[in-house]
Each structure stands twice: as C-alpha cells, then as structure tokens.
Amino acid sequence: MEKYLEVFKDYTNKYDKNDKLISLKVSHSIRVAKLCEDIAKNMKLDEKDIKLAYIIGLTHDYGRFDQISRYHSFDDLKTMDHGEHGANLLIEMGLINEYDVDVDDYGVVAAAIRNHNKLNIEKGLNERELLMSKLIRDADKLDILYLVSKNIIDVSMEKDFSKEAVADLKKMKSVDAINVKSKSDKHLTNLGLVYDLNYEYSFKYLESSGYLEEIVYRRNDEELKKIEENIMEYVYSRGEKNGK
Ligand SMILES: [Fe+2]
C-alpha cells in the first residue's frame, strides 16, 4: 500500500499544507484508507478488493482539496459537491490512472466516491459498487467520529436543536444536511452517523474505540440525553447482535 500512499502524497503536496483544512483532510484520508483496508480484510475480501478499498479510502476526498482552495469551506450545499467533483477528477480527468486500478473497476471507484457524501446511496448500483460505497461510507464516518471525539472538529453548541434534526434521529435515521441550522444540529448530525453504518466491523470498532462515550452527555438536556442513550444502545446492540 506504500506506493499508493506516495501517489496520494504527490497529489496533495500540490496544495497548501500550511492550510489547516488541507492538512486535516490529508491525515483524514490516510486514516480512512487504513480503516477501509481493515474493514475489507475483516469481510474477507480478496487481495484485489482489499487494495481497491484502500485506494478508494485514500482518494475519496480528492474533491475536497479543490473545494478548500477555492472556497475555504466544507459546505457542499453552499459551494460544490466534493463527492461528484472527486469522482470527476479521478475518472474524467484520469487521476485514477496513477493508482494501478483495473479499468473494469473505474465504475466502482466512481460510484463509491460519488456516493460517499450523500445522505443515501443512489439506486441501481451493482453489487461491487454497492459494497465499496458502503465500505467507504463506514470508514469515513468512523474517522469523523474520531475527529469529533478528540475535538479536532468543532463541536461547540450555540442554540437549540432544530425540530427536523431531532425528528430524523427519533426515526433512527442520520440527519439530513438540509435540517442542520445551528452548531447544535451539527452535534446531532455527528451522533446520527451511527444510523448509517453498515458493517459488523464498524459497530465493533466504534464500541471498542470509546469515541461515542467521549462525544455524548456534553449538555444537560433531557431530550438530548434520551437521543444519546438510544444511539449508544443501538451501537451496542448491533455490535453484540453480530456475534461478540
Ligand atoms: Fe468526503
């Protein structure tokens, strides 16, 4: 995997590493690639697919670097869809050629990257496209929860939660970005990521990492406490249900 890491570093070295948002996304991508590799190994995928999962992990945020350079923002709704842009750079612009991926798998890479940042995975994907889309979404979310737990991503609260964001979580769904109206809603968004996790490894990883325990109970609010308890219970039950 070392040679792919070099290709990734060559690409990202073109961007301003003194920019904190750039360095955040460089280290995030490297950790996500490792998580993709670990999930793929845990699922007993073959060598070729473990490699493919790793490459998708490394490249899933390629669109972020242009987004940061142009807008200095991660707000896809207000700037650009970094998933679509990343898929474009890799496939249309040919950056994937640097990574030793079978041409037959270009569609899988495109689908996974296009879908990694969407609320829901698009309909009509084939089995491999769906598998890699779910895999990158899990790995990405696990690392976001790590960043939040370490306060590397700002989690400060400002005002009350929006009813819509709370309603999403009560339905055991992740929070739709259009329902995020305050920093407090971003906290709900982070918690709600668990409802979109797919694989056994991800629940177990989250359970043993202790990230959620570090994130929850940051505010004395009965409604929030109930939501947070439900989320913990959900993660623990999915971890156990999958044969602990
Ligand atoms: Fe992303």
Image (spheres, rainbow, N blue to C red):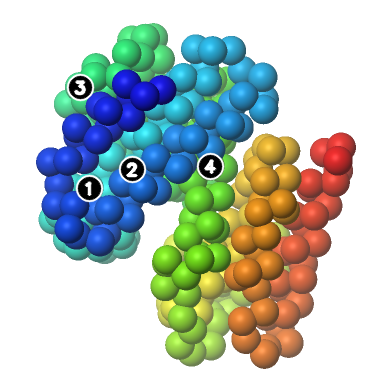
Q: Residues within 10 Å of mark 1 (few under 14, many from 20)?
A: many
* Marks 2 & 3, CB-CB < 8 Å contact: no
* Marks 2 & 1, CB-CB < 8 Å contact: yes
Q: Within 8 Å of ligand 1, the CB of disc 2?
A: yes
Q: Position of residue 29 (x, y in %)?
A: 38, 42
Q: Quadrant of the N terminus?
A: top left
Residue that numbered label 3 is attached to? 94
- Closer-to-camera residue (43/171): 43
The Cα–Cα distance between marks 2 and 3, rounded to whole angstroms, is 16 Å
**Residue at 61% across, 18% down:** 45
Residue that numbered label 2 is attached to? 61
User: Mark 4: which secondary structure?
Assistant: helix
Q: Quadrant of the C terminus?
A: top right
User: Mark 2: which secondary structure?
Assistant: loop
User: Mark 3: which secondary structure?
Assistant: loop
The Cα–Cα distance between marks 4 and 3, rounded to whole angstroms, is 24 Å
- Name which residue type carries label 2: Asp
Q: Within 8 Å of ligand 1, the CB of disc 4?
A: no
Q: Position of residue 18 (x, y in %)?
A: 17, 58
User: Mark 1: which secondary structure?
Assistant: helix
The Cα–Cα distance between marks 2 and 1, rounded to whole angstroms, is 7 Å
Q: Which quadrant of the figure has residue 243? A: top right
- Name which residue type carries label 4: Ala
Residue that numbered label 1 is attached to? 65
**Residue at 46% across, 81% down:** 156
Residue that numbered label 4 is attached to? 139
